[in-house]
Image: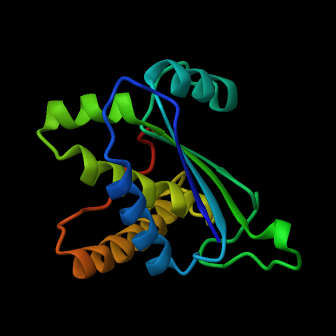
Amino acid sequence: MSLILRNLQNVVPLRRARLRRDVETLRQIIGVQKFDLGLICVDNERIQRINNTYRNKNMPTDVLSFPFYENLEPGKMPVCHHREELNLGDIFLGVQYLMRQCQEESQDFHSALTVVTAHGICHLLGYKHGTEEEWTQMFQKEKYILNEFNRLTGSQLQPLTKRHGDDT
């Protein structure tokens, strides 16, 4: 199905064609090409407002995921009976926050966008990192996805997932 990529900010210049290509590669690796996916790039003000509204955390962040399937078991694909159900959900990328993080850590911004998008897709597929066991499971999934991405593209991306207890 389709990837809906929206850029709702004008603070950080985005290479949308590259981001679209990278996300399509991620979707192929994970096997979710038949599902709609929304990817929305926002500034600090908007991501902070969303984070405060849905997570009671009044601060900007790098990525927030809103799954179409609320209680999906990690590693299980959604079972769909109707066309309208072919939807994974939406990922909000805090591109301004992420750009600042990349500048502080001397990391490539567009590579980081791909990594946080992989992280977001894992959340849409039921993965969490609230306990040590969940963290390990999500880290392994992200590692697999990014290793495949690296093999296909020649990149050297590493998983984002923070240890249990760290905020994301």
Task: Tell me: residue 132, above or below residue 83.
Answer: above
Report whether 74 appears left or right of 8.
right
Q: Which of 27 and 69 is in front in this view?
A: 27
Please indicate, yes or no, whether residue 72 appears anywhere in the rendered image.
Answer: yes
Residue appearing at x 32%, y 80% in the figure: 148
Q: Residue at x 32, y 29 (%)?
A: 12
- Farthest residue in the right direction? 82
User: Is 81 positioned to the left or the right of 168 in the image?
Assistant: right
* Numbered-mark total: 0
Q: Which of 147 and 92 is in front in this view?
A: 92
User: As displayed, is residue 40 above or below residue 103?
Assistant: below
Point out residue 95 in the picture as x, y percentages from the top left corner: 38, 35
Quadrant in which the N terminus appears: bottom right
The residue under the point 36% across, 55% down is 17
**Colour convention of the picture:** rainbow
Foreground pick, 33 / 54 = 33
When the figure is inspected, residue 165 is found, relative to residue 18, above or below; the finding is: above
Q: Is residue 161 visible?
A: no
Coordinates of residue 151 in the picture (x, y in percent): 23, 81
Give the quadrant of residue 62.
Answer: top left
Residue 94, position as x, y percentages in the image: 44, 34
Residue at 88% of width from left, 79% of height from top? 81
53 or 109: nearer the viewer: 109
In percent of width and height, residue 56 lies at: 64, 25
The vertical placement of 12 against 75, above or below, is: above
In the image, farthest residue toward the left: 106
